[in-house]
């Protein structure tokens, strides 16, 4: 009996202790209890979100700003020819610059006018007796001391109007415009006789003062010789007039 009573008493004490212990547990105590996942028991291991993230290398790429200098667009260059000048009008054995003996008169006049401007004198078409020339018509066109002769009869052509000859310079007007015209040999009016002889195989003629024939020169070229007038035949004398072509001269 006594053993049975003690047995019941011990059970009551255990229950009382359990109830008393539960009375001291709070809701916070219940929620703060986290099972020990590091236990060596055979249960599943729970991994935190931080541990689930893959191991990624930090981004070491840096944004590099490149400074680009703007280059202006290239403008195509255009080569502009130099304007025509007296250097174009070379006194040759076959013509004047690009104008050849035998060329059509209006074309020659327009060509020379494009370089020297409008003519200073123009005789228009007239009878050849006016200039003691061959053919049926004749015309003289002047730009200062440069004179061009046109007619319908010369060694260059026959039976049609054409460019016959040129005269550059006047005896009493040395230095007048247009200045700077030169021959194929580089000769011009005002050059000395010494220069003339050095640049061309010229032959000199002393002329005849009594017959009013001035000193002159000529050198043979094709298709026509180049001739001219001088102040004299000494080295210090100078060239006054240069002539080219055939048929008639102004």
Image: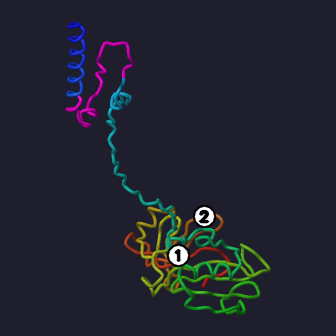
Say whether residue 219 is magenta. no
The quarter in which the N terminus is drawn is top left
Observer-nearest of 201 and 98: 98
Label 1, secondary structure: give it. strand
Does the CB distance between marks 1 and 2 fall below 8 Å?
Answer: no
Task: Give the residue at x 73% y 84%.
Answer: 134
The outermost residue toward the front is 1
Task: Give the residue at x 29% y 18%.
Answer: 38
The quarter in which the C terminus is drawn is bottom right
Q: Which mark is residue 242?
A: 1
Coordinates of residue 213 in the picture (x, y in percent): 53, 82
* Left or right side of 123 for 191: left
* Left or right side of 103 for 32: left
Label 2, secondary structure: give it. loop
- How packed mark 2 is, by other alpha carbons closer than 10 Å (few <14, some 14-19, many 20 or more), is few
Give the quadrant of residue 173.
Answer: bottom left
Coordinates of residue 161 in the picture (x, y in percent): 74, 82
Mark 1 and mark 2 lie on one chain; the one further toward the N terminus is 2
Give the quadrant of residue 2.
Answer: top left
Q: Which residue is mark 2?
A: 221
Observer-nearest of 4 and 215: 4
Task: Give the residue at x 24% y 22%.
Answer: 15
Task: Give the residue at x 33% y 45%.
Answer: 64
Q: Which residues are magenta?
A: 22-45
User: What separation in Å lies between label 1 and label 2 (alpha carbons)?
Assistant: 14 Å
Q: Which mark is residue 20?
A: none
Observer-nearest of 229 and 93: 93
Q: 24 above or below 239?
A: above
Coordinates of residue 61 in the picture (x, y in percent): 34, 38
Coordinates of residue 110 in the picture (x, y in percent): 63, 81
The prevailing secondary structure element of the residues shown in magenta is loop
């Amino acid at each position: 009996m006594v053993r049975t009573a003690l047995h019941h008493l011990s059970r009551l004490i255990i229950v009382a202790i359990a109830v008393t212990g539960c009375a001291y547990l709070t809701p916070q105590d219940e929620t703060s209890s986290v099972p020990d996942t590091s236990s060596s028991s055979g249960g599943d291991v729970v991994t935190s979100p931080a541990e689930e993230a893959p191991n990624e290398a930090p981004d070491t790429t840096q944004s590099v700003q490149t400074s680009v200098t703007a280059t202006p667009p290239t403008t195509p260059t255009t080569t502009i020819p130099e304007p025509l000048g007296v250097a174009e009008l070379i006194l040759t054995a076959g013509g004047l610059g690009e104008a050849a003996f035998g060329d059509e008169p209006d074309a020659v006049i327009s060509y020379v006018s494009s370089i020297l401007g409008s003519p200073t004198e123009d005789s228009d078409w007239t009878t050849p007796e006016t200039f003691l020339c061959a053919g049926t018509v004749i015309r003289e066109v002047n730009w200062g001391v440069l004179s061009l002769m046109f007619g319908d009869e010369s060694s260059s052509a026959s039976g049609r109007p054409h460019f016959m000859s040129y005269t550059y310079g006047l005896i009493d007007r040395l230095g007048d415009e247009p200045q700077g015209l030169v021959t194929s040999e580089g000769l011009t009016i005002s050059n000395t006789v010494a220069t003339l002889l050095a640049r061309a195989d010229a032959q000199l003629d002393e002329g005849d003062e009594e017959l009013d024939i001035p000193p002159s020169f000529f050198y043979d070229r094709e298709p026509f010789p180049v001739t001219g007038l001088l102040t004299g035949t000494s080295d210090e004398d100078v060239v006054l007039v240069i002539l080219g072509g055939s048929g008639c001269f102004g």
